[in-house]
Image (cartoon, rainbow, N blue to C red):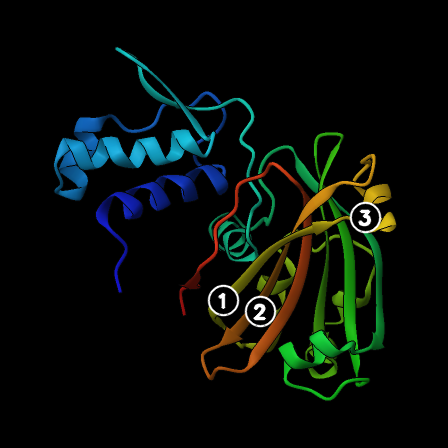
Amino acid sequence: MALPKYEQIAADLRGRVVRGELTAGAALPSERELTERWGVSRSTVVKALEVLRQEGLVDTRQGTGSTVRERTPLARTAGERYATAVATGYIYTAGEYAEIVSAETVPAPGDVATALGIEPGQRVACRHRVTFEGEIPTATSRSWFTAEVADAAPRLLLRERVREGTTRYVEMQTGRRPHTGRDWWTARLATDEELELLRLDGPLAVSEARHVVYDSEGRPLAYEVSVSPGGRWSRTEEYSMGG
């Protein structure tokens, strides 16, 4: 079922902000441009921009239009990062980078085994990272891959950045193109480890996102769990990744 037009417009603009195409302070297309591009009424465009204002992504001033806020409180999905990697060759936007905490083979926990379609305890590759915007840690995440994928993509087990992103790297190494992603979101109290990595004072709630990406044959390609501080907007959806 297609989203309402105003949601489609908001999603398109949101994606451009997430991918860094529209940076802080940048002007959004005018209401007239959006009306003509999407073939909708002005009221539909106004409703789309209101969605982005409510999410804290844009500011609107009479006579000057809408601009991207200086600080956009986004929790970027793995699918959005993959789209950035395909478009630019780099998974992170300007000012972002990751520190790799560990990269190793481990026995698959129950949720990892279920997500990857393997038996619990089978060996999997696990990459643990902390993502920063400038000096501020914004997320900590773990990505898991089957032993078969890890054999074909050996950089997964090196404690160094994969600048094109692990999903894009796995695609290039294996020829298995991401087709569909599925995300689940929840809120919970941070663990002691998460409080330390994200430099937070606890107890404090965090947002947890679980992501599985499937190839064109419906086989799981990667599984990721990402944790971000509260107060960052996120979306729950199933979406195409371009396959």
| Apparent side of residue 69 relative to residue 122 in the rendered image (left or right) | left
Q: Identify the residue under disc 2.
A: 212
**For residue 201, which quarter of the picture?**
top right
Pointer 3 or 2: first along the chain: 3
Quarter of the image for residue 78 reads bottom right
Q: Secondary structure at mark 1?
A: strand
Task: Identify the residue at horizontal 53%, vertical 77% (top origin).
Answer: 176
In the rendered image, the vertical position of residue 77 relative to residue 39, given as above or below = below
Q: Is residue 76 above or below residue 218?
A: above
Locate residue 226, reporting x and y percent: 67, 55
- Reading the image, the residue beneath label 3 is 194
What amino acid type should be assigned to the residue bearing mark 2? Val
Could you classify mark 2 by the number of other residues whose Cα lies within 10 Å: few (under 14), some (14-19), or many (20 or more)?
A: many
CB of mark 2 within 8 Å of CB of mark 1?
A: yes
Query: Residue at label 1?
Result: 181
Q: CA distance from mark 2 to mark 1?
A: 6 Å
C-alpha gap between disc 1 and disc 3: 25 Å
